[in-house]
């Protein structure tokens, strides 16, 4: 074997590998892709663990023959091979310094499914949820279901012997495996099964010579995952080579096909949520649930549960799922569990949507647990120890004492019915002292687990995190048998060396070691990460929820469109991590690899809410673009669409909107304009409004004043009726102002009908004059001076294109214009600022205070921002909207989903008699993104994921709602349908509901 460096723990000759020769030979011998470029390597340096290793390259085999060819070439060159699935391993076993086999690209088929035999034949790259979808119509499912079921692969599950929440009913992955097709390190293909089928030469002899040790050396508990399952080769267990292979973490062979067993899925389910005082009480009760035949017994403590989760009162909960032939039977079993349990409180949920919402809390815990309640970081490493279920309560108490002894914190949760505990701990993995404490704690915890008869790994495997400590669990003699087994399967030590046997140290290859120790100079404040951009990037722990293709939430539309890791939130975070490290991505902020990966980020902010750890790739993208183009020529789209407010303001001042609309309707002129402006040729240029919203407002105001003076009465819509009326500032965002003023006009009509007086932001800066010495001035009569004229702007287009210096200037001008309202001496509480465009509202709530974190006015303005629905709910709580009585379809704006929330919108729609729900996902236009040259196909694919199918399925009377200008534009250009802002729909209904006599009287 070639020594790739002492740090990596591989053995053999000291000569470095011939990388160019390796790459050329692989490309010649394989039909799949061979990628040794910077991006491919950077994307695979890490999995979901604390560890990092830089591979030489990545290959994506098309079939078993390609796998065999790759192994043959790598063996010749003395380069190790690491099989990789979804890359969600938590112990470091999906990383390596040689060649990474990406088995997800091509080897991802469900070859066959036999409903009568209840088996399926799958390739290793099949995502678990895909198998579940195909099996479901037959009333079947694959039993094990890790929380990463939407992106983990069957190959990875077999490699780690994964389990999931339903293991109390259906066991581990090994319990569901029948036969495996495997390519060994020497390139030979074997079929593994029972009765020694496929065993390498010498394995049977070794086992038959160690029967006593194998019968007594393994702890008996449901979640014993650590080490090799050599006890599965005992004659009384059928000498099951396939089962023994499960959990070998890619160290014995490369899986190319599997025959797996399916189980009958319950037709109905109920979820009993049992509340206890604390986690120890919940753990003590978990084992008592097992005789009642539950499908799950999952535990969570209050630390991981948001306060509005709707759980019964308590400090910890068991999620106990039951099944039945019908809902009544499932409910009856859940009720029986509640009656048998000694609980503080309980809740039984039978509604499938309600169950899914609760299970999301549990599944997201692997991410949410990485942040402590005070925002500090927590890490895996001792993620999934398991003990006999009856000892779980005692173990957790001892575990808590050990944490306290080392001044560490963690929140246990997990598979309490199986005695398996997940926990992220606030290790300091950045300093020598912290890493030393990490090692000491790990050694003592291993002893504690063993003292309770447990397993160091109860689900995720040993990898680098725990393999070094396996002798404490098994003893040196049994670990010696593991080494002998590895040598029989893989005599050249080609496959994933340093894992399970002859392991790397648990405190080397830490992924944090390469990051800069001093904070990076950045523009945004990153308040949740202490102002440290490296800490922000570290948020991504690799659980890869962004890689799901399920139609839920928003994250990550570009990955759903392309299927490429570099277009996932995780992939981009990995590239930024490597950019900061400087080893693989060597040109820092100037990196073209990072730029290209971020190019297809729609800045939808979906990851800000959908990522369990709140990665905000839109902000990271803006930060990167700011540095990348500093002092350099920017793309044309940044100068046109990135500065859209400036151009549209110029058009308004010069009165050239009609001329530009005419030119845009002439194909040659439009084509020239799009080419010069960096706009996709497939796009139509939106028409500019003949009259801006502000001009309409000014004209309307003057007409009202004239009418009041002429008639000697106040306009009844603005006259006070004896009771104080709420006042709101309506924000004239760029899109409402110049492109869709009808939305602003409709909002004014509805807000005034609801009893809210509307005003627009100032266009003149009013500055406080410092009183002269001895001058007495009251707060209510403070002298002000008139400053510069201007227009408010949230800075969205500048932020999304990374023009952050310009964004800050625009935002500071906005704060100056709004200064009177943001002065606490004048307005202790700023008046409500109603923003109709969700993306602009999101920019004011998040980008503004994070970019101007040094200006207290920014936070005050952000706190005053309300959406249209929020304004009606807060300022006019007793107002009843007109009743429309229509179904709706359309889309919740991605920024509203991620930043603003849509609860008020849903309540307003319900009050107005609008039925149905809006689609999720992203429309794909996303401001400037979908208009930029080269983005059209991705933009269209994003729209086709959820929005356009929902529109096509709508009935003719369905109201098409889309509050975002981008969403409405996408609908018009791709579906030929005109979307409406909710304000427009309500205003139209108000006009139709006016009393006929009043109409006649006003004619």
Image (tube, grey):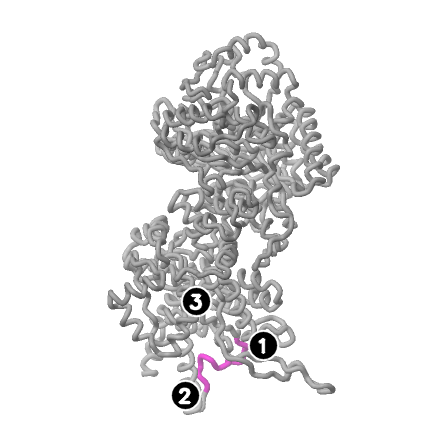
| Mark before the other along the chain sequence, 3 or 1 | 3
Q: CA distance from mark 2 to mark 3?
A: 39 Å
Tell me if I can see residue 417 in this picture: no
**What SS does tag 2 mark?**
helix
Residue 890 part of the magenta-drawn span:
no
Q: Is residue 231 above or below residue 416?
A: above
Name the front one of labels 2 and 1.
1
Q: Is residue 188 above or below residue 928?
A: above
Say what secondary structure mark 1 lies in.
helix
Residue 228 position within the rendered picture, expressed as x and y whole percent measured from the top left: 55, 21
Q: Residues within 10 Å of mark 1 (few under 14, many from 20)?
A: some
Residue at image mark 2: 707
Sequence order check, earlier mark of 2 and 3: 3
Q: Is residue 701 left or right of residue 467?
A: left
Foreground label between 2 and 3 = 3
Between residues 514 and 619, which one lies in front from this camera angle?
514
**Point 33% across, 79% down: residue:** 999
Residue receiving disc 3: 643
Secondary structure at numbered mark 3: loop
Residue bearing mark 1: 820
In terms of secondary structure, what is the magenta stretch mainly?
A: loop
Other-residue count near label 3 (Cα within 10 Å), few / some / many at <14 / 14–19 / ≥20: some
Q: Give whichever of discs 2 and 1 has the lower sequence position.
A: 2
Q: Residue at position x 43%, y 52% from top?
A: 599
């Amino acid at each position: 074997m070639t020594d790739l460096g002492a740090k990596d723990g591989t053995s053999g000759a000291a000569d470095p590998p011939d990388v160019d020769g390796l790459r050329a030979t692989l490309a010649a011998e394989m039909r799949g892709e061979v990628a040794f470029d910077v991006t491919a390597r950077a994307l695979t340096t890490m999995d979901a663990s604390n560890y990092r290793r830089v591979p030489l390259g990545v290959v994506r085999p098309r079939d078993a023959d390609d796998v065999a060819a790759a192994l043959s070439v790598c063996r010749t060159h003395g380069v190790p091979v690491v099989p990789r699935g979804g890359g969600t391993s938590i112990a470091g076993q999906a990383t390596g310094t040689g060649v990474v086999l990406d088995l997800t690209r091509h080897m991802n088929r469900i070859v066959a499914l036999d409903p009568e035999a209840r088996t399926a034949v799958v390739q290793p790259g099949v995502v678990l949820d895909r198998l579940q979808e195909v099996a479901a119509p037959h009333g079947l499912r694959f039993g094990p279901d890790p929380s990463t079921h939407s992106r983990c692969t069957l190959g990875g599950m077999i490699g780690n012997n994964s389990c999931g929440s339903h293991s109390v009913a259906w066991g581990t992955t090994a319990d569901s495996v029948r036969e495996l097709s495997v390519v060994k390190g020497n390139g030979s293909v074997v079929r593994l099964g029972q009765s020694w089928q496929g065993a390498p030469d010498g394995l049977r002899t070794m086992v038959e010579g160690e029967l006593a040790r194998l019968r007594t050396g393994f702890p008996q508990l449901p979640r014993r995952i650590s080490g090799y399952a050599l006890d599965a080769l005992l004659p009384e267990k059928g000498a099951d080579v396939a089962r023994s292979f499960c959990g070998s973490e890619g160290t014995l062979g490369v899986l190319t096909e599997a025959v797996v067993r399916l189980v009958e899925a319950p037709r109905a389910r109920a979820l009993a949520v049992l509340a206890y005082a604390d986690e120890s009480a919940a753990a003590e009760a978990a084992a008592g649930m097992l005789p009642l035949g539950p499908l799950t017994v999952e535990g969570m403590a209050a630390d991981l549960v948001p306060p509005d989760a709707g759980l019964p009162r308590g400090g910890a909960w068991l999620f106990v799922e039951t099944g039945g032939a019908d809902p009544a039977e499932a409910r009856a079993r859940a009720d029986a569990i509640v009656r048998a349990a000694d609980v503080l409180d309980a809740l039984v949920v039978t509604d499938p949507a309600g169950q899914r919402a609760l299970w999301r809390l549990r599944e997201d815990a692997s991410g949410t647990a990485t942040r402590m309640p005070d925002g500090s970081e927590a890490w895996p490493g001792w993620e999934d120890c398991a003990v006999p279920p009856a000892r779980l309560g005692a173990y957790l108490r001892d575990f808590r004492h050990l944490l306290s002894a080392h001044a560490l914190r963690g929140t246990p949760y997990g598979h309490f019915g199986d005695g398996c505990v997940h926990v992220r701990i606030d290790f300091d993995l950045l300093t020598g002292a912290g890493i030393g404490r990490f090692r000491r704690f790990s050694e003592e915890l291993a002893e504690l687990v063993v003292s309770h008869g447990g397993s160091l790994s109860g689900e995720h495997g040993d990898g680098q995190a725990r393999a070094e400590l396996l002798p404490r669990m098994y003893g040196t003699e049994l670990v010696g048998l593991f080494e002998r087994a590895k040598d029989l399967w893989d005599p050249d030590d080609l496959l994933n060396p340093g894992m399970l046997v002859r392991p790397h140290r648990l405190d080397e290859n830490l992924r944090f070691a390469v990051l800069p120790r001093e904070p990076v100079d950045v523009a945004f404040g990153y308040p949740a990460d202490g102002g440290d951009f490296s800490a922000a990037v570290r948020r991504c722990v690799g659980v890869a929820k962004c890689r799901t293709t399920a139609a839920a939430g928003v994250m990550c539309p570009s990955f759903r469109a392309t299927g490429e890791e570099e277009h996932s939130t995780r992939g981009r975070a990995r590239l930024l991590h490597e950019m900061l490290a400087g080893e693989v991505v060597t040109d820092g902020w100037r990196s073209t690899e990072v730029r290209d990966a971020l190019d297809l980020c729609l800045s939808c902010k979906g990851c800000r809410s959908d990522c369990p750890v709140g990665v905000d790739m839109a902000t990271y993208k803006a930060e990167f673009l700011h540095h990348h183009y500093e002092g350099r020529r920017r793309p044309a789209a940044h100068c046109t669409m990135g500065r859209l407010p400036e151009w549209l303001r110029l058009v308004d001042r010069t009165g050239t909107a009609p001329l530009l609309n005419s030119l845009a309707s002439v194909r040659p002129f439009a084509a020239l304009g799009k080419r010069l402006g960096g706009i996709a040729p497939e796009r139509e240029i939106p028409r500019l409004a003949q009259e801006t919203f502000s001009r309409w407002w000014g004209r309307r105001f003057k007409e009202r004043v004239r009418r009041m003076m002429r008639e000697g009465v106040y306009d009844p819509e603005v006259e006070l009726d004896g009771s104080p009326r709420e006042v709101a500032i309506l924000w004239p965002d760029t899109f409402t102002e110049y492109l869709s003023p009808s939305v602003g006009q409709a909002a004014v009509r509805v807000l005034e009908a609801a009893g809210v007086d509307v005003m627009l932001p100032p266009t003149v800066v009013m500055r406080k004059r410092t009183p002269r010495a001895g001058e007495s001035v009251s707060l209510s009569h403070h002298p002000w001076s008139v400053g510069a004229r201007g227009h408010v702007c949230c800075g969205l287009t500048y932020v999304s294109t990374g023009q952050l210096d310009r964004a800050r200037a625009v935002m500071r001008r906005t704060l100056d214009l709004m200064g009177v309202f943001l002065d606490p001496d004048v307005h202790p509480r700023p008046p409500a600022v109603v923003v109709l465009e969700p993306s602009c509202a999101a920019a004011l709530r998040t980008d503004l205070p994070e970019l101007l974190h040094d200006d207290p006015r920014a936070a005050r303005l952000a706190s005053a921002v309300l959406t249209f629905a929020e304004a009606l709910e807060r300022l006019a709580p007793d107002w009843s909207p007109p009743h429309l009585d229509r179904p709706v379809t359309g889309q919740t704006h991605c920024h509203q989903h991620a930043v603003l929330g849509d609860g008020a919108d849903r309540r307003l729609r319900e009050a107005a008699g609008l039925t149905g729900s809006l689609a999720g996902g992203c429309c794909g236009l996303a401001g400037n993104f979908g208009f930029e040259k080269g983005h059209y196909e991705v933009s269209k694919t994003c729209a086709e994921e959820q929005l356009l199918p929902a529109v096509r399925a709508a009935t003719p009377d369905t109201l098409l709602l889309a509050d975002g200008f981008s969403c409405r534009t996408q609908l018009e250009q791709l579906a030929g349908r005109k979307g409406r802002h909710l304000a427009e729909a309500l205003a139209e209904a108000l006009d139709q509901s006016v009393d006929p006599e009043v109409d006649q009287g006003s004619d």
